[in-house]
Image: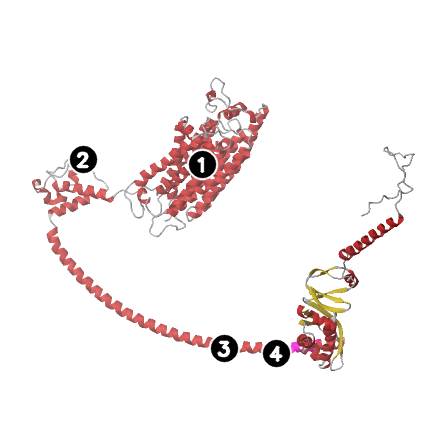
Amino acid sequence: MDPPQQRPESPMEIPMDQQGRRSETPPPRPRPAPAAAAGGDFSAIITVLFFFILIFSFVAFQSSSTLTNNLTLLHQVPEGHVGMYWRGGALLKTITEPGFHLKMPLVTQFEPIQVTLQTDQVRDIPCGTKGGVMINFEKIEVVNRLHKDYVYETLLNYGVQYDNTWIYDKIHHEINQFCSAHSLQQVYIDMFDQIDEKMKDALQGDCTRYAPGIEIISVRVTKPSIPESIRRNFEQMEQERTNVLIAMEKQKVAEKEAETRKKMAITEAEKNAQVSKILMQQKLMEKDSSRMQEEIENQMYMAREKSLADASFYRLMKEAEANKLKLTPEYLELRFIEAIANNSKIFFGNKVPNMVFDQRLLGNFLQSPASSSPHIGPPFLPICNSRTYPGFLSLIPLLTEGIYSSGLKMYLVESKGGAIACMLLSLSFLGTWPAIMTLLERRGRLPQHTYLDYTITNLLAAVIIALTFGQIGSSTAEVPNFLTQLSQDNWPCILLAMAGGVVLSLGNLSTQYAWAFVGLSVTEVITSSITVVIGTTLNYFLDDKINKAEILFPGVGCFLIAVCLASAVHSSNAADNKAKLMAQGIDTSVVKEASPNNGDPENGSSGTAPKAKFGTADFLIEVEKRRSIKVFGKSTLIGLVITFFAGVCFSLFSPAFNLATNDQWHTLKEGVPHLVVYTAFFYFSVSCFVLALILNIIFLYRPVMDAPKSTLRAYLSDWNGRGWAFLAGLLCGFGNGLQFMGGQAAGYAAADAVQALPLVSTFWGIVLFGEYRKSSRRTYILLGSMLFMFIAAVGILMGSSGHRKD
């Protein structure tokens, strides 16, 4: 290889120095190479470059044109085609599959041949019918396919445009042949549905014979165009034909309807005849049966009367014989003493012998010597002893045994007066325990500790009621006592009672936090009103409407008014408290908790600090420092939400208890007695206790409403205020029990009158906590709501029927 030659410098190029300036002295020119050698090397490079460009153009620039296919080296066969090649005009047997392939440019020609389904459309095919009418087929579609195995033979015989010969030209020929052999009526209407198959068979027959590689799949022929006047005639003829068909179908329908009516009439007549025959037979059989029954009854009556007469005669005979043996002085004495003992009043004293033991009444048998009768027991009367009246003293153990054998019955409230007494006691109990709980919370005792103590004695009250009132007397099948009913299969009603306990526990737990936000008075008014509005309505329908709706529901409406008034009082009171604090420039978010020695703002024992007046900002701050649930800086809407949630819970526990004791849904098995009120109250309190125990143990470690954390050990050692919490639980337990006892007698809708408990709780709220003491307007509004509640309670009690329907 020759060494590279230096390119001669162009005369326009001027050398420059390192700073980019022109050099004044040009560099020495290199010696030029021989011309012959330089010319030979340049032509070789050009030749190589030319061939490279030519090859690159053959490979890179392809198109579908025949010229380009002939010039390219690399060509592509698309999917669904095979490649066919010609060399010098001669068809080669080489067949390539889809993909890229190589061929000799200019020497070998290439064509892709489709071997998949293709549709050839033959357009504008004129033809003349047998009658000489010219028609035109606008389009005929032929779906065909060329088999891959016959591609070479087909192209060899008929070329690339083989379909011109065997499809396009053939279609023209076959259509004209068909039209010339048939009339316009046959081509356009009668035999038009057969043209497709005839064309397909004709094409496929010739292809199978001369070009076996071509497969005709289907032929689709469009309706031909005919002269307008002829087309209108065809349409009119078709319309007339349609009318004829319609008339024929109407005639057939009329015939069928007439035939149907005829068959129905025949069937109806046959049915009536058969029914009449059967009714006649039935009447004859009834008369025959009646006659036989009367004969049998007459015979039975005669036999019965004869037997009764014989039996009566025999009884009288035997009684006469028995009386002769039975009517002794001792028997007459026994009957006399039993009659005296059955009297409702027995008089004791010195005058008794003159009345009871009159000789005219007793007869001479009392004069018999007493020495024949042994002494039995102590004397019954001061003047009676074993020596004087031995027969009378012998009867005392018998009478005592009879009294004890009759047994005592379980105590159940059944009168209206007893129900009202129970509800009044329940009203005072249920209105007092919330004040005790609120007092403990404001003194700083944690609500978790208070509620755990409360729920223990609440369950204890239910146990006491069940083991006393529920165990009085012996158990019967209709009214079993408490311990007997624990083993009965009454689980559906037990679950309903426990459900009532769950919602009551949730409601009581919610009100414990609502008292801190809203206040005792307003909380009790709202929750009690919601309870009456919803609970009384549900109980009214569950009790089978035993209460007077025209008196009961106006009372419910008064409770609803009380809800609105109490909400207004709360909104006004909250705004007033906020204004008092802001007037003194107090930031409620920075009030710190006071030490344990700061005293009790509610009862005025504030240590050395002067006592704050009720309703003032200083009083509110002292209460906030001391209490366990901090409310400053929190939205009062939280308290209202909790209050309304508690009211909804309270409205459901009484209907659930009603269902548990009276089983309106008939969930108990046949023969299983209903739950007595004491058993239902026991399960009710058990579920209340379990839920409260679980939730408050969780709240010890994960408190809500930003209350302080605690532990189980801290709760057990916290005895400050525990006695008051125990007292609150007992009051609530006995209050609920008395409410249910009264509801079992007067109806649970009437028992909801105890929801007038805000009459009591508001009294405690004003006396103990100074609520509304400095605001006459809010006091009047609250007293107005109390008045509505009092009217409602009276209305509910008046609406009570006094006794439940069994």
The secondary element bearing badge 2 is classed as: loop
Residue count near mark 4 (Cα–Cα under 10 Å), binned few <14, some 14–19, many ≥20: few
| Comes first in the chain, label 4 or label 3 | 4
The foreground one among 204 and 318 is 204
Question: Badge 4 is on which residue?
Answer: 248
Q: Is residue 522 above or below residue 92?
A: above
Q: CA distance from mark 3 to mark 1?
A: 80 Å
Magenta highlight on residue 502: no
Report the magenta residues as a range.
235-245
Question: Badge 2 is on which residue?
Answer: 349
The secondary element bearing badge 1 is classed as: helix
Of circles 3 and 1, the one toward us is: 1
Say which quarter of the image contains residue 572. top right
Of circles 2 and 4, the one toward us is: 4
Of circles 2 and 3, the one toward us is: 3
| Comes first in the chain, label 1 or label 2 | 2
Q: Is residue 694 left or right of residue 158?
A: left
Q: CA distance from mark 4 to mark 3?
A: 23 Å
Question: Badge 1 is on which residue?
Answer: 695
